[in-house]
Every structure is written in structure tokens, then in C-alpha cells.
Image (tube, helix red, strand yellow):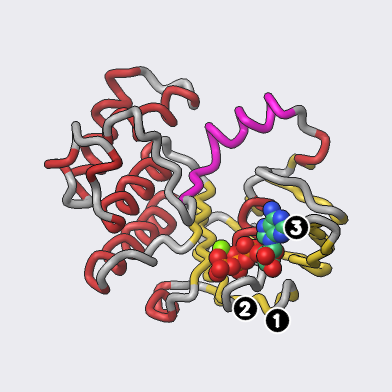
Amino acid sequence: MKTEIFVRLSDVSKKYDRTGVETLALQHVSFEARAGEMVLLLGPSGSGKTTFLTILAGLQKPSEGEVTIFGQNVLDYSPKDLQKLRAQHIGFIFQTFYLLDSLSVIENIMLVMKFAGISKTEANQRARIFLEKFGISHLTNAYPKTLSQGEKQRVAVARALANGANLILADEPTGSLSTLQGMTIVQYLKDAVMNDGRCAVIASHDERIRPFADRVLTLRDGVLV
Ligand SMILES: Nc1ncnc2c1ncn2[C@@H]1O[C@H](COP(=O)(O)OP(=O)(O)OP(=O)(O)O)[C@@H](O)[C@H]1O
Ligand SMILES: [Mg+2]
């Protein structure tokens, strides 16, 4: 039996228009990722990695081509349905973390689970398990502004995994971390993929992640090589 395809891009191109200057951020990219797979997407700055991941997550639409998430063509989805699909099935680790400053660390992690319909008690328990795993339980009630970059990054990863999402999309998840901290997180993503049949797509410059990946792809000037 063929393993389930979680996400697929078919001949996707993305053009940005910034004050009259066009950038072709992705050019005719086709890609698919399956259950139980960890894919590493390498590429220099500006090669289109973040664009690739945000399109995979349905966070923005391609200029051309099709995006299928869990067998559904997301271009047909209403914004509300897309938000629901993301809350329940996709964990996104943003390059800039996107933690809410007005919420504590545990509240940040619990909020995403609330959107996914997980009860408060369950969300609280899960959040604590991840904080413990990532060695940041002393920061449970701290506010994001008081955290180091590496600590914020670990909160962002905990938040992405805690809702049980099948598809984990991670944008530079190790950028601010030491080798030990960074590889601990990658190993954790790897375990989530191998043990729970999830799928992770990691965009990074970080060559240290290579040994963990089942597949390594490279983007160059928006082209998958
Ligand atoms: N919202 C936007 N409007 C206009 N141009 C954009 C926008 N977002 C990205 N770009 C351009 O698209 C190209 C690809 O950007 P992208 O952020 O996907 O690259 P990246 O590989 O993630 O880079 P980095 O490694 O620095 O994070 C770049 O030339 C960038 O300037
Ligand atoms: Mg980027």
C-alpha cells in the first residue's frame, strides 16, 4: 500500500509585486510529502523557502498551480475552513516565532489547542509535557518579551507539536539554538514523525539537520533542484 500523501504542490509558481518590482519567488515547483517522512528543504537566503512553506500551509495562495492538503484542494476552501484545517492538522513553526506578547508561555501553547477544539484541562497537561521535554518548564508563566531567542524558538516548536498536528512545517527551527539544543529539537521532530506517523517539512540553512532527514531538497532562485 502506498503511504498517504499529506500535502502536494503541483506546478506551483509564486510572483510577488513589491512597489512595481516583480519577484518570481517560486517557479513551477512540484512536491509531495507523505506520512512518516521528514523532508529537509535547503537553500540560500531569498531562495523561496518561507514562500514554499507558507503555500504548503495554505497561509498564502500561489500565483499559479495547485495545492492539495490531506487530499483537499485548498484553493477551493473558504478562509474559515482553511483556518480550521490548519488548527487541527498543521503545526507551523514560524521563522520569527509569532508568540503573542500579551500571553504567557503556557497560554501561547494552549491557545492553538483551543482553536483545535482541545479542552482546557487537556491543553494544559499537554503544554506542560512539552515544556518539560524542551527543558523550559521554569518559563511556564513567563512572558515572551523576557525570553532569549533560543527559548522563544523552543516555545514555538512546543506550540506546533502540542495540538497533535499531522503535518509539521518548520521554518528555520534551529536558527537561534546551540548545536545541542537545535539537534534535540530536530530529534524531537524526527521522533514525532517516526513514532506517530506525522510528516515534517523543515526549511533551513542548517546543514547539521541533513543526517536526520529522509529526503533533502534544495531551492535555488525559486527552482527546486
Ligand atoms: N511579501 C513579499 N512581498 C514581496 N516580495 C517578497 C515577499 N516575501 C518574500 N519576497 C521575496 O521573495 C523571495 C523569496 O523570499 P523567501 O522569504 O521565500 O526566501 P527564504 O528562502 O525564506 O529566505 P531566508 O533564508 O532569508 O528566510 C525574496 O526575493 C524575497 O525578497
Ligand atoms: Mg525564510
Name the kind of residue labelled 3 in the image: Leu
The tag earlier along the polypeptide, 2 or 3, is 3
| Vertical position of residue 177 compared to residue 76: above or below | below
Residue that numbered label 2 is attached to:
218
What's the distance in space between the residues labelled 1 and 2, CA to CA? Answer: 5 Å
Residue 180 placed where, x, y %? 22, 70
| Vertical position of residue 20 compared to residue 84: above or below | below
The chief SS type of the magenta part is helix
What's the distance in space between the residues labelled 2 and 3, CA to CA? Answer: 15 Å
Q: Identify the image quadrant of residue 32.
A: bottom right
Name the kind of residue labelled 2 in the image: Thr
Q: Identify the image quadrant of residue 86.
A: top right
Instruction: Assess disc 3: are there few (<14), some (14-19) or many (≥20) residues with their C-alpha within 10 Å of its C-alpha.
Output: many
| Vertical position of residue 151 compared to residue 211: above or below | above
Q: Are marks 1 and 2 in contact (CB under 8 Å)?
A: yes
Which of the pair 9/180 is nearer the observer?
A: 180
